Image (spheres, coloured by chain):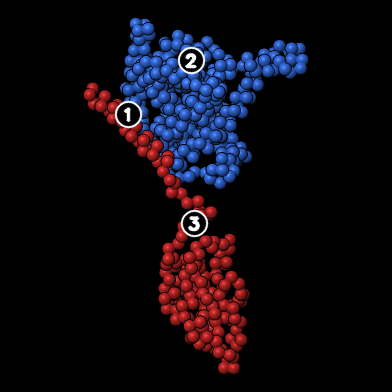
């Protein structure tokens, strides 16, 4: 009999206590981030979409070799002796013409292993993480702008979304 | 209804209309008025429920539709539900399946006949109003059982069975708790009960004597169980039964179950307000605010306060187990309500 009344009393006390907790939470600040209008600031070393600054690229292909998923395709040819010398922004002479530099972001595993070997620091991970597309093919990013002069390209390559 | 009948007198040649039309037109008009108001209030309540639940969980809830804090969210949802396909399961009992949501809604809607919104705003002041409320409230049980059985789905059947067991059990303590008020008011008419509480907060039956004070809580707990709300939402337990008796429903019929659920909340809050919180009478009749606020607004505010408590409880308490539910009803609330009725009767006779 005593347990019966103690249980009822305990029920009333615990209900009051939990209601008080809910009441306090009614006035605490919401933690929701209204996503499309507000966004988190991405951390300093965020690894999201890859970007290649093609003017600095010497076409060495070290990134393609480092890539564990083979998502980078590079095709180059030697620049002619009569062509004017080109230099990357850090002074490295660009001896190869990169006429294909494709990154397939559907294959990318965001490991950033391609970024470290780049001698001219032209390949980098950006903070851009919202790049969903309707067609999977649009996830292949073509960075090359030059056309091949001597070699025959293995790819039909178009210059877009660099 | 008298005021509506007086309004209808303004229609030209109203007196030469056939007697049948003259008798039924006020009823029709009041039914339409109540249905329209009810739908609006339910739309507001669904939005409020989502906002209250969101903020109690440190979220924001709907924020976009309509601009200001997502006020049009439920309107958009209602339109979506009305336009959706109305699916009837292949092996369901078609007639019962199609009828059930309307019977459930009828149980909630018919109760509005005797709820006094104001001094003259009552559809029909039946002299057995309280009894009528209790009787018509039981109609929902039939509809819920029909829905659960006709769906031919185990989740629906379990939900319907649990709901019926729960409502049938909890009607008893609710009815007996109401008896304490009836003893004090000496009438079963809702309007008489409100008139007995005129004159401010200290005249409310809630604060009249300790027995009615406790009876209010007994009634409130039992009414929570009657409208299947947390902590008594085992008929709709999302984690166990999908959605209970309305699992198989879609489109407009589902919307009707939703409407009935919220209409039932308004009914039980309205009955609690009428019986214990003074109905449409003023809280502080002497003050300026007491004279300015009209009766129906006062009633609405009190009902909203009670509904807010229902929502508040929903996000404070976990769901009861079936055996705990029955324990609470038969071993705690029922003896308590008997003692309260005996005590209230004793006070009414020997301590005037």
Chain letter, blue in picture: B
User: For the point 59% across and 70% down, which residue is it?
Assistant: A161
Would you say B44 lies left or right of B3 here? left
Q: Which residue is mark 2?
A: B198
Residue ranking furthest to the left: A2
| Label located before the other in sequence (1 or 3) | 1
User: Quick one: B195 or B201, which is closer to the camera?
Assistant: B201
Q: Label 1 vs label 3: CA separation?
A: 43 Å
Q: Position of residue B292 (x, y in %)?
A: 55, 23
The mark lying in front, picked from 1 and 3, is 3
Q: Secondary structure at mark 2?
A: loop
Q: Is residue B172 visible?
A: no
Q: Is residue B151 above or below residue A105?
A: above
Q: Which residue is mark 1?
A: A12
User: For the point 41% across and 24% down, which residue is it?
Assistant: B220
Give chain A's shade.
red
Q: Which residue is mark 3?
A: A39
Q: Label 2 vs label 1: CA separation?
A: 31 Å
Chain to which the residue tagged by mark 2 belongs:
B
Q: Is residue A57 above or below residue B257?
A: below
Would you say B210 lies left or right of A39 here? left
The crowd level at tag 1 (other Cα within 10 Å; few <14, some 14-19, many 20+) is few
């Amino acid at each position: 009999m005593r347990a019966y009344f103690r249980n009822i009393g305990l029920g009333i006390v615990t209900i009051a206590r939990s209601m008080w907790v809910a009441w306090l939470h009614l006035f605490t600040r919401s933690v929701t981030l209204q996503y499309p209008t507000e966004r988190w600031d991405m951390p300093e070393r965020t690894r999201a979409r890859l970007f290649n600054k093609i003017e600095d690229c010497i076409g060495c292909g070290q990134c393609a070799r480092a890539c564990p998923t083979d998502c980078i395709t590079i095709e180059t040819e030697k620049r002619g002796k009569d062509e004017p010398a080109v230099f990357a922004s850090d002074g490295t002479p660009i001896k190869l013409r990169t006429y294909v530099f494709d990154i397939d972001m559907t294959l990318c595993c965001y490991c950033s292993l391609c970024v470290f070997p780049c001698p001219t620091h032209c390949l980098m991970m950006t903070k851009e993480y919202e790049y969903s597309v309707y067609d999977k093919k649009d996830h292949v990013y073509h960075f090359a702008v030059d056309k091949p002069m001597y070699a025959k390209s293995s790819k039909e390559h178009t210059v877009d979304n660099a | 209804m008298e005021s509506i009948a007086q309004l209808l007198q303004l229609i030209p040649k109203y007196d030469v209309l056939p007697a049948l039309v003259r008798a039924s037109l006020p009823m029709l008009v009041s039914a339409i008025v109540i249905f329209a108001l009810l739908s609006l209030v339910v739309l507001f309540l669904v939005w409020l429920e989502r906002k209250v639940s969101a903020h109690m969980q440190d979220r924001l809830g709907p924020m976009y539709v309509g601009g200001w804090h997502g006020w049009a969210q439920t309107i958009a949802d209602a339109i979506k539900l009305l336009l959706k396909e109305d699916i009837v399961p292949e092996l369901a009992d078609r007639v019962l399946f199609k009828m059930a949501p309307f019977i459930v809604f009828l149980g909630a809607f018919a109760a509005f006949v005797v709820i006094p919104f104001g001094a003259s705003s009552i559809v029909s002041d039946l002299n057995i109003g309280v009894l009528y409320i209790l009787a018509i409230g039981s109609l929902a049980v039939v509809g819920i059982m029909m829905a659960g059985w006709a769906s031919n789905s185990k989740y629906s059947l379990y939900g319907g069975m649990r709901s019926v067991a729960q409502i049938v059990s909890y009607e008893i303590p609710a009815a007996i708790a109401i008896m304490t008020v009836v003893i004090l008011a000496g009438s079963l008419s809702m309007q008489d009960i409100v008139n007995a509480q005129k004159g401010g907060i200290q005249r409310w039956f809630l604060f009249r004597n300790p027995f009615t004070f406790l009876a209010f809580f007994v009634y409130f707990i039992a009414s929570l169980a009657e409208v299947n709300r947390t902590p008594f939402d085992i008929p709709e337990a999302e984690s166990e039964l999908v959605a209970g008796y309305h699992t198989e429903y879609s489109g407009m019929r589902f919307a009707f179950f939703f409407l009935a659920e919220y209409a039932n909340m308004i009914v039980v809050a309205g009955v609690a307000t009428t019986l214990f919180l003074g109905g449409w009478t003023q809280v502080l009749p002497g003050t300026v605010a007491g004279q300015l606020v009209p009766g129906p607004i006062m009633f609405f505010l009190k009902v909203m306060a009670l509904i807010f408590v229902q929502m508040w409880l929903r996000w404070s308490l976990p769901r009861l187990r079936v055996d705990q539910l029955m324990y609470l009803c038969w071993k705690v609330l029922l003896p308590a309500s008997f003692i309260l009725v005996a005590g209230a009767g004793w006070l009414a006779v020997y301590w005037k």
